[in-house]
Image (cartoon, rainbow, N blue to C red):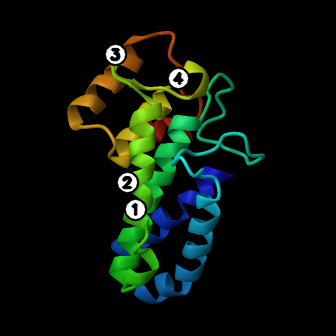
Amino acid sequence: ILDFTALFSNVVLEYLEASGDRKTCESLWPLVLVQTDFTLEAVGKDGLVRMDQNWWKFIDWQPAMTRQAAEQAVVIYSLRATERLGRQLGHEADVAFIPTVIKQMTEAARKNLWDESRGVWVSDGGNVSWMSQAWMALAGLPTPEEARRSLKVVMDDPTTVRPVTPYARHYFC
């Protein structure tokens, strides 16, 4: 599942920051790198997460939701965590490429997934979901004003795709 794989680095980073247990995090660092490499296999040369692959993309069990914008944001969010974790553990060389990938993915998201006229992040097929807005905000792509606007738009519009699982809702809240 792409988003769970991507989020592994966040789990390790949060564990390090909460516990201070560098030894365990050092032992997990090689797996963080493997998971990051696997996650990046989903990113095309254009900087967009490819939705045509035969990978599970969870985000939520909502059947009406297309997941491109949310997955794009999860990958960016997780890359930021991988870079921060690598720097905290002293593995700067391992994460030196990440800012370039984040920049490319952010530019691709802005160009292809942001609908300025509506003030929302849009997935393939024009799908607008609560989770795409939430994950983009968590990933730091919108300005604070854009984030507020997009979250308000989806909450006020009954045609947007709402999350159905507590897992998804906790990221929105």
Of the residues tagged 1 and 4, which is closer to the observer?
1
Q: Does label 3 or label 2 sit earlier along the sequence?
A: 2
Q: Does label 1 or label 4 sit earlier along the sequence?
A: 1
Q: Residue at x 35, y 70 (%)?
A: 84
Compute the Cα span from label 3 to label 4: 21 Å
Compute the Cα span from label 2 to label 4: 29 Å
Marks 1,4: beta carbons within 8 A:
no
Q: Residue at x 47, y 81 (%)?
A: 25
**Tag on residue 117?**
3
Residue indicated by mark 1: 100
User: Which of these two is toward me, 1 or 34?
Assistant: 34
**Tag on residue 12?**
none
* Residue 122 visible somewhere in the drawing: yes
Q: Does label 3 or label 1 sit earlier along the sequence?
A: 1
Residue indicated by mark 4: 162
Give SS at disc 4: loop
Marks 1,2: beta carbons within 8 A:
yes
Residue indicated by mark 2: 103
Q: Amino acid at mark 3?
A: Ser
Q: Residue at x 50, y 25 (%)?
A: 129
The picture quadrant where one finds residue 52 is top right
Q: Amino acid at mark 4?
A: Arg
Percent position of residue 114, x then y: 40, 29
Compute the Cα span from label 1 to label 4: 33 Å
